[in-house]
Amino acid sequence: MDIKLKDFEGPLDLLLHLVSQYKMDIYEVPLIDVIEQYLAYVSTLTALRLEVAGDYMVMASQLMLIKSRRLLPKLVEAPPEDDDLEMTLLQQLEEYKLYKQVSQDLAEQHQQRALHFSKPKEEIVAEGMTLTADKSVIDLFLAFSKVMAAKQEQVRTSHTTIDKDDYKIEDMMDEIRDRFSQTHQLTLVAIFEHRSSLSELITLFLAVLELVKIKAIEVTQTENFGEVYLKWIGEKGATDVTPS
């Protein structure tokens, strides 16, 4: 079974996605929070053993440099070039946002022009998620990144453990069904409680994605970077069916 997550078109596309969640001017967003979200995303990709393009890693190193400069105490007479890297990045984001908007406008014009021609019937595939504010499956992935970052820190600071390496997605799906036999709704964080193994966390997350894919679970989020809720709707699409 292959589960594919939405790919960004590059590191700037990922950064723009994170910045856009704040719905404010690019130069006013809390850059440290955005950097932490980006690094958590890349770290989770690596933990899932997914290939990470080199340009993502280059951007990660630049962001870590910017973050370190932000956290260090500022000198009274700091040289002006200290902020060049940060300002250059913000300017690149602004330009990328402009070109992306132009690209989207051209794509819409292309779609309108295509209406003048006969086209074969296309099947519309729903994502199986109901997230507000134009959310997508990537927001579920970003929420999981936070859980992974916390668990990785916990593993680093605790005693050494040997991970069990025979976790199966099907078994985790059954375990999630059992959790929902007592309630119709759980938070994403609650799903991962009392889990100490990173491989167990990853398998459990993939099981959640598979249940979302087959429309057994509905995912909701009421605010940007807020709590993610999982609601059991039944594997046959019934609204009030709990697993047996």
Image (cartoon, rainbow, N blue to C red):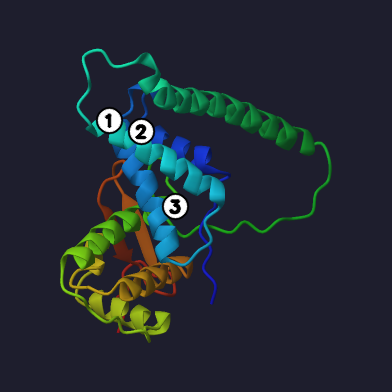
The crowd level at tag 2 (other Cα within 10 Å; few <14, some 14-19, many 20+) is many
| Residue 112 % position (x, y) | 72, 33
Residue under circle 2?
Answer: 66
The crowd level at tag 3 (other Cα within 10 Å; few <14, some 14-19, many 20+) is some
Residue 64 relative to residue 96: left or right: left
Cβ atoms at labels 2 and 3 below 8 Å apart: no
The crowd level at tag 1 (other Cα within 10 Å; few <14, some 14-19, many 20+) is some
What residue is shown at x 36% (from left), y 58% (from top)? 219
What residue is shown at x 31% (from left), y 71% (from top)? 198
Residue closest to the eye, 172 or 156: 156
Residue 75 relative to residue 201: left or right: left
User: Can residue 25 be seen in the rendering of this structure?
Assistant: no
What residue is shown at x 78% (from left), y 33% (from top)? 113
Query: Farthest residue toward the bottom?
Result: 166
Instruction: Give the mark toward the camera: 2 or 3.
Output: 2
Residue closest to the eye, 67 or 7: 67
Cβ atoms at labels 1 and 2 below 8 Å apart: yes
User: Can residue 43 be seen in the rendering of this structure?
Assistant: yes
Residue under circle 3?
Answer: 138
Q: Which label number is shown at residue 70?
A: 1
| Residue 128 % position (x, y) | 46, 60
